[in-house]
Image (cartoon, rainbow, N blue to C red):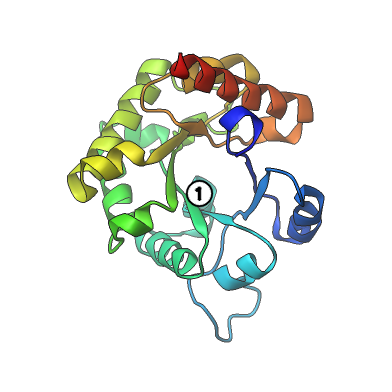
Amino acid sequence: RGVEGVEIVICPPFTAIAAVVEGAAGSAIAVGAQTCYSKASGAFTGEVSAQMVKDAGCRWVIVGHSERRQLFGETDEVANAKLRAALSAGLSVIFCVGETLEQRNSGDMDSVLRRQVLHGLKGLTVTELDRVALAYEPVWAIGTGVTATPEQAGEAHGFVRALVRAQFGEAAAESLRIQYGGSVKPDNAAELLSLPDVDGALVGGASLEVDSFSAIVAAGAAEIARAAR
């Protein structure tokens, strides 16, 4: 745990992992990678396996980020293979799902999220799910400065948790962490983190400024304190 119960994970580019691991040594900050490859070993020049990520000092890895899906053609099947490889290597996983603006406007949000969640988590046991945090990324709100309204975020998170409940049971759904990721900033973090089904934030651009990221962490700590009262 980090600041007052907030778990903090920093996910730098591959080339910076060693330096970040060294810098975070002795602190409560964990380190993760931004992706990994789905094969444990073999002749895959340029790829980085989950075991290599772990050997570099990471405890976490992000799988299925919207940019990996959009720019690099990663399918639900590829994301599932990467997820299972990461869990097999002993890593914990931030598994990303989310719809594009076109999919939301056409009424396909629910079907997209259902496919991404059910196909992405296919084959996992309840025990393995304990090492997975889901991250809901409304793709239309990433890096745009546009943030989902509390109602939009709450609806999507509740829908995702219901999918997990149907697949893995009530206990697994209640203990699952679902993060919101989409232009999270200091001025909206508190409101987003106060929503019943929002358990954290996947922070992008705002994490590049120390003061900005610290303010978001502080908002998380304040929400934990508020909920405990």
Residue shown at 31%/61% (left/top)? Answer: 124
- How crowded is the residue under tag 1: few (<14 C-alpha within 10 Å), some, or many (20+)? many
- What amino acid does circle 1 point to? His
Left or right, 207 with respect to 78, comes to right
Q: Is residue 111 visible?
A: no
Residue shown at 39%/51% (left/top)? Answer: 130
Residue 171 percent across, percent down from the top left: 26, 42
Quadrant assignment for the N terminus = top right
Left or right, 12 with respect to 173, comes to right
**The one of 85 and 91 positioned closer to us in this rendering:** 91
Q: In which quarter of the image is residue 144?
A: top right
Left or right, 158 with respect to 144, comes to left
Residue 113 percent across, percent down from the top left: 31, 42
Q: Name the residue under label 1.
A: 65
Q: Can residue 61 be seen in this view?
A: yes
Compared with 225, 180 (above or below) is below
Q: In which quarter of the image is residue 206?
A: top right
Q: In which quarter of the image is residue 150?
A: top left
